[in-house]
Image (cartoon, rainbow, N blue to C red):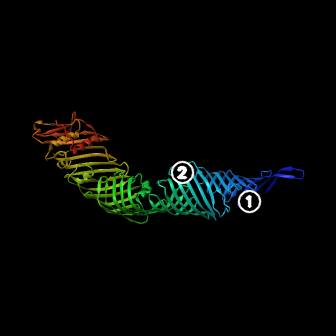
Amino acid sequence: MWRVALIGVLWCANAYALTGVSITADSITYDEAVLADAKVTLDLSGNEQAIVDAKTLQYGTARLDDAHILLDLKANTTLLVKARQISSPQFDARNPTIYLDYRQTTLQPTLSFNAEIKPLSDKQWANFSLHCLIPPNKQKDTWHCVDGLYVGERTRVPFTIDFLPQPNGLEADIQFKQVSFSDESGLHAGDKLTGSVKLSAQLVKSKWSWKGVFSWKEGELFWQPFYFGQAGNQFDIQGTYQAPMLNIQQANLQINGVGQLSASADINVQTKAFNDIKVKARDVDFAGLYQTFIQPMAQKSVFGNLRVSGKADWEFEVKDLQPQNFELNIENANIEDLNGKFGFTNLNAHIPWDYNQAKQIFLAYERGHLLKLPLGLTHLAAEVNRYSIVTPQLNLPILDGALQFEDVSAAWVGNGMVWHLQMKLQPISMNSFSKALGWPEMKGHIDGQIPLITYANQQLNMDGQMRFNMFNGMVAMSDLRIDRPIGVAPKLYANLTMRDIDLGDLTRTFNFGSIEGKLEGDVKDLRLENWKPVYMDAIIQTADGKHLKKVSQRAVENITALGGEGTAAALQRTFLRFFKEFNYEKIGLSCQLRQDICKMGGVESTPSGFVIVKGKGAPTVNVNGYTQYVSWKDLLARMQRITDGNTKAVVQ
């Protein structure tokens, strides 16, 4: 329904002159635009303007609310459009301003747009502006737009864009410079990003088909858990988009410092979650692959601080947030844990995994080390079946012997790994073993058998007793438990037992002086934190029985030095120049360790201290200690000085 009113009349001698006209209508349709509750005012008093106000202006899928349009009716036309907001399927805009300038004073007609905009998936509003040159043929020629700027609470994107309209689509070349962004969670961020995006897209039945090239020349990008600190990357990519899902059908990714990767993925642009991911990498740099992709996912594990080199092939697939398959091939690689726990030289590995079928794993290395123990040439094989891995036997050469693992089985259950195994220790030279650990040089061999060991809920437990044969006697460990054994700060709990240790062999090994007899000992409630003792009740002493019990003067001097200040050896001076060894009844020393303080004791107590060596017969010697509390570090330092042969005790 149309309603017309005369705004004003100018009287002259010959005629009336019309100065303004107002027209209202329930609906006005012009080309693709539909105005509702519209009012058109013509100002003919010299300004020659048309003013249009409408409750809504619908143009395609976009709707302008409370639209206000100012049209210059002169030959040099300008058009200003303002509104309260714009609503569209992709974004909302507040207080938009659209300005068209067709004046002949400009080289080319221009279109400017300013507004606060918000993609439907976001909560925060951002300021957006863009200035475009209007080509002669708007439907077929390229639009050149400059001074683009998108500024939000945590985002700043300066850009320019050239786009060519297509039937149901477009082609665009976007140049961006010094872009910065971050999200509220801190899981996604970029800084000083400079590069370009070339994109073409076609809309068919509400789905966009697109392809593009993303070139990244400068800046840093973090997308939890991955960090890309080196620019020079390029993504060739194509796919589809139907809100909210972005489907990457094929992407060739050139990652600086890594190599060429091919990928496909489905991304929910609202939640920023990745689904149905496939990635393949061929002949990439293993160091770059580790630093960019593997290390971020292994930060809190034993594999989180490695130095690596070599080449690798890598691929994996994730579907509906569940892993489907994985394969890692490593060629001529070197791996070194910077915390000193392990290392491998010239490592080659084929590590596949598939959700639906069993795979064979192979790993070999030329040499390596575990803690400080050298590892020899090794070949390992196992079968992985979904979330479990089994092998009847693994042989791990160590020094001149080997660890032989049997009945090895491991499985991923819930959020953690569980496994069990049995182990035999084939004879290892104590000489090479002690040298590897930096201990005093020992003689003989060490061998033994370890019963069933299980690991679950980040805890290792040993069923039964682990026994080692050494120094013609036996050393056993029981009640072993290790919390987080491959974590940053593991804790170990155990009890130790020593029986029938030949003191002659032991003392000669440590250059301690000669003690003949048998040694026994117990370490109860041993607790190590990060492999350092913090708690134990320990006692070592000579065994009772009918066997030779002799101690040399050198051994007495070292026992006295081990006791520290306040320890004295009472020798019968009359015999000192004639006898180099003495009879004893009992030798013993105890330590109750609490954190770094050790409460010392001996074979028996005295009113002023404790007895370390209790003599018997003639010639005889007694060694008494008087300082009960000593630092554990000091006690270790005394042991080191004694074995280095640098201690000369004062013998009284």
Q: What residue lies at 85% left-to-right and 50% top-to-bottom?
A: 9
Q: What residue lies at 23% left-to-right and 43% top-to-bottom?
A: 641
Q: Nearer the viewer, residue 300 or 105?
A: 105
* Residue identified by numbered label 1: 29
Left or right? Give the position of 554 relative to 277: left
Pick out the residue farthest to the right.
13
Q: Nearer the viewer, residue 463 or 339?
A: 339
| Label 1 secondary element | strand
Position above or below: 10 against 139? above
Q: Position of residue 585 (x, y in %)?
A: 15, 42
Left or right? Give the position of 216 relative to 75: left
* Residue identified by numbered label 2: 180
Position above or below: 306 against 352? above
Position above or below: 244 against 500? below
How many other residues sit within 10 Å of disc 2, few (<14), some (14-19) or many (≥20)?
many
Q: Position of residue 560 (x, y in %)?
A: 20, 39
Q: CA distance from mark 2 to mark 1?
A: 43 Å
Left or right? Give the position of 330 relative to 446: right
In primary-sequence order, the first of circles 2 and 1 is 1
Left or right? Give the position of 372 relative to 570: right
**The C terminus lies in quadrant:** top left
Amino acid bearing label 2: Ser
Foreground disc of the pair 2, 1: 2
Q: Position of residue 232 (x, y in %)?
A: 49, 57
Q: Which mark is residue 105?
A: none
How many other residues sit within 10 Å of disc 1, few (<14), some (14-19) or many (≥20)?
few
Q: What residue lies at 25% left-to-right and 58% top-to-bottom?
A: 401
Q: Position of residue 352 (x, y in %)?
A: 40, 63
